[in-house]
Amino acid sequence: MARKKVKIELEDSEGSKYSIVVEGNLTREKVLKVFEMMNLLDESNDEEKDMYAQELNSLGERIMHLIEEEFPYGDFTSSQVLEAYEDRYNEPIKLSMVSTYLARFASKGVLARSKNGREWRYRRVMLKH
């Protein structure tokens, strides 16, 4: 099997530049973890959000609202959220975007995430009062 190599470069709002190279047996989960790490770097500059970030936040809010209404108690996958999103909002969305938001929600403790075969399954975390 050929070794894969991914190089990611970004610059934050303060002008700091980051370059990350991941090489070897790459899986989708490994690449998503790199993007999650990059999001953590970006979230440290919350006070300087640009128009693109605000647009993504509204997308995240729509996805979370959809999850609350369509999947209040059961498990669900990113593919199920994608299908429900496209049905509800009548607009296309990439599966990678849905997966990124679900992974982000899981890292914040809003969703629980577990591996079932080749897919991730999610469930809303119920807060106890």
Image: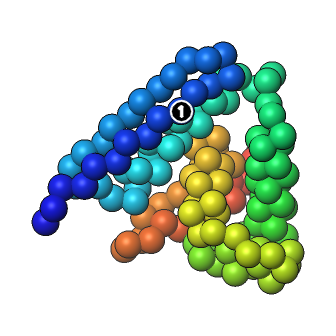
Q: Is residue 119 above or below residue 106?
A: below
Looking at the rendering, which quadrant does residue 65 occupy? bottom right
Q: Nearer the viewer, residue 1 or 30?
A: 1
How many badges with numbers are in the image? 1
Residue 33 to residue 9: above or below? below
Give 23 or 122, whichever is nearer the viewer.
Answer: 23
Residue 106 seen? yes
Farthest residue to the left: give it. Answer: 1
Q: Position of residue 39 (x, y in %)?
A: 59, 37
Q: Residue at x 25, y 45 (%)?
A: 23
Q: In what element is the residue under mark 1?
A: strand
Query: Does residue 114 appear to the left or right of 58 in the view shown?
Result: left
* Colour treatment of the image: rainbow
| Above or below: residue 129 compared with residue 4 | above
- Which amino acid, by three-letter code, is at mark 1? Leu
Q: Can residue 112 be seen in this view?
A: no
Q: Position of residue 16 (x, y in %)?
A: 56, 18
Quick one: quadrant of the N terminus?
A: bottom left
Q: Indicate the position of residue 26 as horizontal and vertical percent values.
A: 29, 55
* Closer to the camera in the image, 36 or 49: 49
Q: Quarter holding the C terminus? A: top right
Residue at 15% in and 62% down: 2
Tell me which residue sits at (38%, 34%) in the image: 20
The residue positioned 83% from the left and 60% from the top of the image is 62
Label 1: how many Cα within 10 Å (few below 14, some 14–19, many 20+): few
**Residue under label 1:** 10
Please tell me in which quadrant of the rendered image residue 77 appears: bottom right
